[in-house]
Amino acid sequence: MAWKTLDDMELNGKVVLVRVDINVPVENGLVTDATRIEKIVPTVKDILAHGGKPVLLAHYGRPKGKPVAEMSLKLTLPALEAALGQAVTFAEDCIGGPAKAAVSAMAAGDVVLLENTRFHAGEEANDPALAAAMAALGEVYVNDAFSAAHRAHASTEGIARLLPACAGRLMEAELKALEAALGNPVRPVVAVVGGAKVSTKLDLLGNLVTRVDHLVIGGGMANTFLVAQGVEVGKSLAERDMAPTALEILEKAREAGCTIHLPVDVVVAREFKAHAANETVPVADCPADAMILDAGPQTVAAIAEVFAACRTLIWNGPLGAFEIAPFDAATNAAAAKAAALTAAGTLVSVAGGGDTVAALNKAGAAEGFTYISTAGGAFLEWMEGKDLPGVAALMD
Ligand code: 3PG
Ligand code: MG
């Protein structure tokens, strides 16, 4: 690997600045999903075990360069302390007096969390002065925030160029899983791409058709491909103006030898609500007054066959309206199949992207995957084949 890990660094007695992503969902001041917080624990504990003093740098929300009380990282403190099993000192600013005081008071075994880096306009501007002010607090920089690595910000990119830098354990795990899924995968490779709109995933589809052997298209975006091929989809969500683009993607796939799999049967309803009356029809028979809300059982069987024939699966986006039962059936069944093949040892399965993780958790299949990314936007940009600035800065 072109980047260093904690194993390559001298940490004993050193102040270690660790960029983490603890941008977790919060409701009424309480963290509702602590996954991202739990995932940074191995890195922090590893630094402590090697005698280092971890000082956590992170953003929260989008405060647009000024302090916003509701976006203080203080709200993550109880969840962070619970995950680490120890007290954490909070500093009211990520640079200057409060940060320096907290860092200089650290004893071995202590952990410090600095206030939201995005309270400074220089964070998103990747201002060298802010990066230097943060770098001045420590001696080593560890980036454990893969899910924020698509941002070229002072705490993810600029600072990595100012201190000896390495990937944390979570960053390492993410990069290895992604490399196994798309960088240098065991073939054949199948990608599942779902979700509402083709327009938001154009670059992703364009990149994938040149990299994978099979591409399963699901969700609302499948309707756009169906329309492009002259299939009538009634009142279904479809981006009719994207039809030419869909045809271009199909052509690009044909040239690249990537087989595209679209629904052959669909579950249709007249209302978009849970338990709406529904029927399953061949894809060509969507009634004019109905909308497609899920893929049908024959489609699921075809997807299962593709999964069984492949050795690597990369998944982004649900196959149907997974938020409302029973239109989560195809997503659940395909996820269960992926988990079973993973358990049987024939499939390496990697998934990521906001809705995807929610859908797989809901399907109860997330644990059965080889790797579930903590990243939303960063996972998508990586699937698009883009360089992630936060990762690139660790390479140099
Ligand atoms: C995320 O939640 O996707 C990351 O923390 C990045 O946040 P951002 O989209 O506000 O940059
Ligand atoms: Mg985001």
Image (cartoon, rainbow, N blue to C red):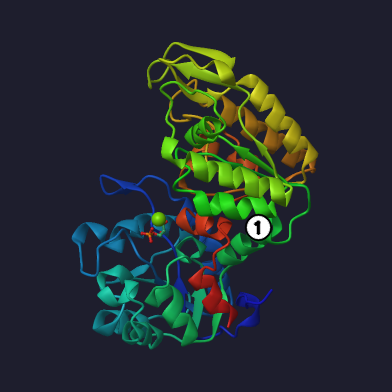
Q: Residue at x 57, y 42 (%)?
A: 247
Reading the image, the residue beneath label 1 is: 177
Examine the rendered structure and indicate whether residue 389 appears above or below residue 376: below
- Identify the residue at image location x=38%, y=67%: 58
Q: Residue at x 53, y 19 (%)?
A: 267
Residue 52's spot in the image, x, y percent?
Answer: 52, 80
Q: Is residue 373 visible?
A: no
Callout 1: SS: helix
Rendered image quadrant of residue 387: bottom right
Left or right of 150 on screen, residue 301:
right
In this rendering, position of residue 50 left or right of residue 120: right
**Picture coordinates of residue 330, whole percent (x, y):** 58, 27
Q: Establish if 248 lies above or below 284.
A: below
Quadrant occupied by the N terminus: bottom right
How many numbered discs sit on the rendered protein? Answer: 1
Q: Is residue 173 above or below residue 278?
A: below
Specify the quadrant of the image occupied by residue 117.
Answer: bottom left
Badge 1 amino acid: Ala
Position of residue 40 measured from the top left corner of the image (x, y, whole percent): 51, 62
Residue 32 versus residue 132: which sits nearer the camera? 132
Percent position (x, y) of residue 215?
65, 42
Q: Residue at x 33, y 86 (%)?
A: 133
- Camera-side residue: 118 or 137? 118
Mark 1 near ligand 1 (CB under 8 Å)? no
Kindly indicate the quadrant of the structure image that contains residue 66: bottom left
Q: Is residue 12 visible?
A: yes
Left-right relation of 122 to 20: left
Where the C terminus falls, by quadrant?
bottom right
Q: Quadrant of ligand 1?
A: bottom left
